[in-house]
Amino acid sequence: MSAIVAIVGRPNVGKSTFFNRLIQRREAIVDAVSGVTRDRHYGKSDWNGKEFSIIDTGGYVQGSDDVFEQEIDKQVELAIDEADAIIFMVDVESGITGMDEDVANLLRRVKKPVFLAVNKVDNAKRAEDAVEFYALGLGEYFTLSSVNGSGTGDLLDALVEVLPEKEKEEADLPRFAVVGRPNAGKSSFINALIGEDRYIVTNIAGTTRDSIDTRYNRFGFEFNLVDTAGIRRKSKVKEDLEFYSVMRSVRAIEHCDVCLVMFDATRGFDGQVENIFWLAQRNNKGIVILVNKWDLIEEKETNTMKQYTERIKKAMEPFVDVPILFISALTKQRIYKAIETAVEVYKNRSKKIKTRKLNDVMLPIIERTPPPAYKDKYVKIKYITQLPTNYPQFAFFCNLPQYVREPYKRFLENKLRENFDFNGVPVTIYMRKK
Ligand code: GDP
Ligand code: GDP
């Protein structure tokens, strides 16, 4: 998992410009590999070899300035709760505004690292103007120009300095996180599984800062169930705030091995569930889709489920090798099957295929259907290994890695899936020079 950095500030100070600058290089790579749509407000970045997730919190608060004024406390409060570090962005052109002062008041009390970023400092004259921001009482500030990039390096140097080291994925129990929008039925699902009042259990067990973990044993397999829903009861935040559920999901997803992406069957696999799905995919987590409240769907001929499945798969393209289960937390229909499936996905994700086996299976397939020639060059794939990472990544060694195009990589991925079962697990393929 990587650290989470939140950018806060009032509208128009340049948060999304800065955000885009940070994720640009990486997103270009990610998009080329997976071809997936991306969330405009959440991305991964790295600096000096340290990776972090970055969230443009402003992107989740739409509407006019007065709407924003009502929302800003919540936005900052969430950033304070969820992020490991906060970048507070202000605008040298407009100087200090009342809203900046409000945010500064909230941030002054925070123990987490806060970086005051004075944006739009496009030239030396403006660097002098930035002095007024000392008045916010947050100490040193960084001047930068998100448009031309100047000053961003110094800010990032200081930022990554304070971020926690990238942790190894917890070696202890596997972690399954139930994620989804508010009211999808996450708490009901977990309560149904546990069959008792979870809150009593957790009071005794103690809660982590960001989620409620329940140790669970089923099918001879022990794991932690991570509930992101319970927390909101403690928060003052309005439950329907989209930003809130995304922020929660980001953290839960970063900390787990398998995500149970749950949604309400009567509401469908909408854009917000899709976002959560892609967050999990982009973090290389195992995924199980749970269509909850299936008891409320009237027409339950075989076709209903089939049509439903097809619709979801369409939205998940090209990553469609993911289990989809129709459950009811209310009637307990298939809730154990859901856990059993999560265990299978976990095993698929931790699977290591021997190099010998991999080559025995894949080389004949490649021989029958070699990469198409590109610019009159013939690509010869010599051997394949699985990399020793904690999720499946494969290196295909060949003479001309740069000439292997996306469709052929997808073909290889599909063949790996057909032969080795990576159901529910994102698989990464690298072409390497040999
Ligand atoms: P957000 O609402 O905080 O996300 O702000 P945006 O990133 O949408 O930027 C608001 C406006 O400020 C846009 O017109 C940007 O082009 C402009 N802007 C952002 N960064 C800079 C900068 O470093 N210098 C200048 N001159 N303009 C900037
Ligand atoms: P959460 O916000 O995702 O934790 O959702 P809750 O577990 O609090 O559930 C939201 C609402 O949906 C509650 O009123 C539940 O009783 C209801 N609900 C949850 N699961 C089911 C289900 O499988 N069927 C039906 N009919 N209602 C459900």
Image (tube, rainbow, N blue to C red):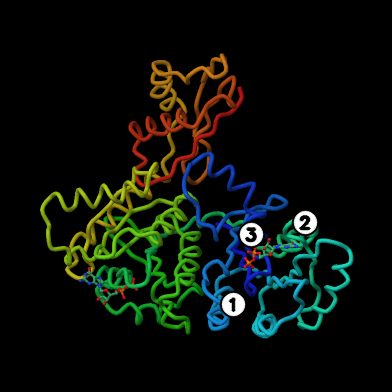
Q: N-terminal of the two: label 2 or label 3?
A: 3
Residue occupying the point 76% across, 61% down: 145
**Badge 2 vs badge 3, beta-carbon distance below 8 Å:** no
Q: Within 8 Å: ligand 1 and the Cβ of disc 2?
A: no
Crowding at dot 1, Cα within 10 Å, few <14 / some 14-19 / many 20+, comes out as many
Work out which residue is located at the far front of the displayed protein and give it: 64
Measure the alpha-carbon separation of dots 3 and 1.
17 Å
Q: Identify which amino acid the numbered label 1 is placed on.
A: Val
Residue 76 vs 36, above or below: the answer is below
- Residue at image coords 69%, 50%: 49
- Residue at horizontal 39 percent and vertical 21 percent from the top: 365
Image quarter for ligand 2 equals: bottom left
The amino acid on which the numbered mark 2 sits, given as a three-letter code, is Gly
Q: Is residue 392 visible?
A: yes
Give the numbered dot on residue 76.
1
Residue 217 position (above or below residue 408): below
Residue designated by label 3: 19
Q: Give the side of residue 309 with respect to residue 243, left or right.
A: left
Snapshot quadrant of residue 10: bottom right
